[in-house]
Amino acid sequence: MYNYNDFDAKFVAERNRQFRRQVERRISGNLSEEEFKPLRLMNGLYLQLHAYMLRVAIPYGTLNSRQMRQLANIAERWDKGYGHFTTRQNIQFNWPKLRDVPDMLDALAEVDMHAIQTSGNTIRNVTADHFAGAAADEIADPRPVAELLRQWSTDHPEFQFLPRKFKIAVSGSPNDRAVIRAHDIGIGIVKRDGRIGYCIIAGGGLGRTPMIGKVISEFVTQENLLPYVEAVVSVWNLLGRRDNKYKSRIKITVHEHGIEKIRSLVEERFELLRRTYSGIDIKLFEEITAAFSPPEFQKVSAGEFELAYKSDPVFESWADTNLAKHRAEGYAIAQISLKAHGQTPGDATSDQMRAMADMAEEYGNDELRISHEQNVVLPHVRKSDLPAIHSILKKHGLATANIGLASDIIACPGMDYCALATARSIPVAQDISNLLKNLEDEIGELKIKISGCINACGHHHLGHIGILGLDRAGVENYQITLGGDATQNTALGRRTGPGFSHDKIVPAVERLILTYLELRENSGETFIEAYRRLGMEPFKSALYDRVHAHAAE
Amino acid sequence: MTGKFTPKVVTANALREGDVVYMKANDDWTRDLGEAELLTEEGYAKLRLLMAEGQPEYVVGPYLADVADGENGPRPIHFREAFRSAGPSNYFHGKQAGLN
Ligand code: HEM
Ligand code: SF4
């Protein structure tokens, strides 16, 4: 197994020692808040609405059981017994006290974890599919490429002062689970004539000005990958706007200049750059790939699985929604839903974290993943162990069978925690989840995503139903978008019209869903398919006309 | 409505605990909005904010928040301040669970 740590132990220990001193100096009044704030942010400590918040990095969303247990201990000892897993594959603790944070950081360091935030206008952590190394549809594991890019960019002298931050995501499968079209650069692993190569996408992003990335090159070979990516970053570094922080991301550069012009500039630059690469990167890539080599899969009978599947309807329904196809025969990818009905999306208690750690150790090659959809994944489990796993999940309130369904909602913390929020998102998610609990199997696949402000941490633009909470004249107001898609068919949702108040938003979502159920061709046509066929009109009318009709009654 | 000053309180987050606090008339900090000093005059409100800014060893980010005068002292006008004075809505945590 690869050692993913961004930082070596000595560096982290030194940083923790420094931060302990800085906290002491802040408390004793020898550091002002102006001096202290950048230091605490660098160490992942934010001041939210009701308390401090500590954000801990989970590179590639990958954890072992020891690390998960330590997170459970930290939550219990210094927080309120739970943690919040985010769409950025981090965990956040919502209630630490300033004086305890240095101890929390030391506890993290014991298991090779840290809260150090890559900050500034640099190339940020490279992200990859949470099913990496396990998915049946995978062409190649995306993590070696992600890791190569991370190592290459970390110390790259030219890229320390970019116009803005820069994010790269890699998918190893044609079914994109890493949202590569919503990143500054997205990389899809592809195969052509038996050779592995990379499809490069540039200029995607969400937030204030959402854009879908465009293909800049359909096939870049392994030898050319780094020089090509460097050429893209370098062209943007020259053209990117530094005068306005809202216009500095590459999505705006691509939008303003057009992808054709950017492509030809990149090709030119690439011709110069490729000669400066000596092949060291290829050797490094081979080393990294070897370190990511998969566990040894055994041939095991799935008899117990089949038996439970036939005899236990609860297990059957869980298996139908929460399992994904594994590359090895007799194995499955098990997704653990952190979306129990009516609960906060992404939250896990210390008891639940320990249970998941135990299962990973006992049945799952000691590996856990955090997905950007705020769920936990056991990437390598034998199908024959699934009945046992399911019964443990049930005991810990973790057996919700709703992955991909209406209650598997992404929601950012919103105004229940976040100081930047313009409205709440969590209670909207809770209410929708409760409302649709008994209907969701009938509804089928549906992605609802909620953000509490324009920063779009909840990816609302990419929801089949997206909800954005705003502050309209001192009242919470929720805008709906329809038709967003986070897969390889990436699409941004379109606004339906005026927003809804906090007590009207859930009934509005209900009207959308009833309209879909009424108008779909058959039970096989999903919400997003029906929307694409029918367009906005029937949904708009359900949202706005009927309300008027009711009001007139 | 021009010229009419909306009453204010001075609020901030406590440095050590991070939770929401309000300034009292005696310059102390309280966790209970009802105990905060109601500021009904603009110049005086600005002065009180300056006093708060002079206490960086107790509080972070002091500012003036709009309030209304109520039976039990000041009460929030904007929903953000209402949440700050109560706690999150998904768990019974924060102030609603008892002032610490
Ligand atoms: C609660 C404290 C948080 C704060 C203060 C915060 C702040 C921000 C800000 C300012 C941005 C915009 C950055 C930019 O592109 O300029 C952002 C983006 C983002 N945040 Fe958060 N965030 C918070 C929590 C979260 C959580 C809990 C999640 C996951 C559920 C999350 C996921 C994201 C994602 C995915 C983006 C990128 C959206 C994009 O592609 O543009 N954030 N955040
Ligand atoms: S979208 Fe806005 S409200 Fe939600 S976490 Fe991000 S910054 Fe906070």
Image: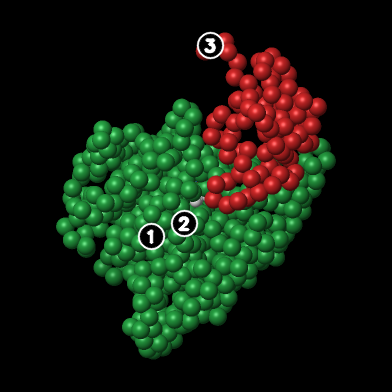
Which chain letter goes with mark 2? Answer: A
* Residue B62 vertical position relative to residue A522 in the rendered view, above or below: above
> Which quarter of the rendering shows the C terminus of chain A?
top left
Amino acid at pointer 2: Gly
Instruction: Provide residue A225's location: percent of width, then percent of height.
Output: 40, 57
Amino acid at pointer 3: Thr
Residue occupying image coordinates x 44% and y 30%: A472
Using the image as rendered, state which of residue A511 and residue A297 is in the foreground.
A511
Whether residue A279 is visible, yes or no, is no
Whether residue A310 is visible, yes or no, is yes
Question: Which disc, if any, is residue B2?
Answer: 3
* Residue B6 vertical position relative to residue A504 in the rendered view, above or below: above
Separation of marks 3 and 1 at Cα, in angstroms: 50 Å
Give the green chain's letter: A
Question: Which disc, if any, is residue A342?
Answer: 2
Instruction: Provide residue A59's location: percent of width, then percent of height.
Output: 54, 60
> Which quarter of the rendering shows the N terminus of chain A?
bottom right
Callout 2 touching callout 1 (CB < 8 Å): yes
Chain B color in figure: red
Q: Which residue is mark 1?
A: A437
Same chain? Circles 2 and 1: yes
Using the image as rendered, state which of residue A506 and residue A247 is in the foreground.
A506
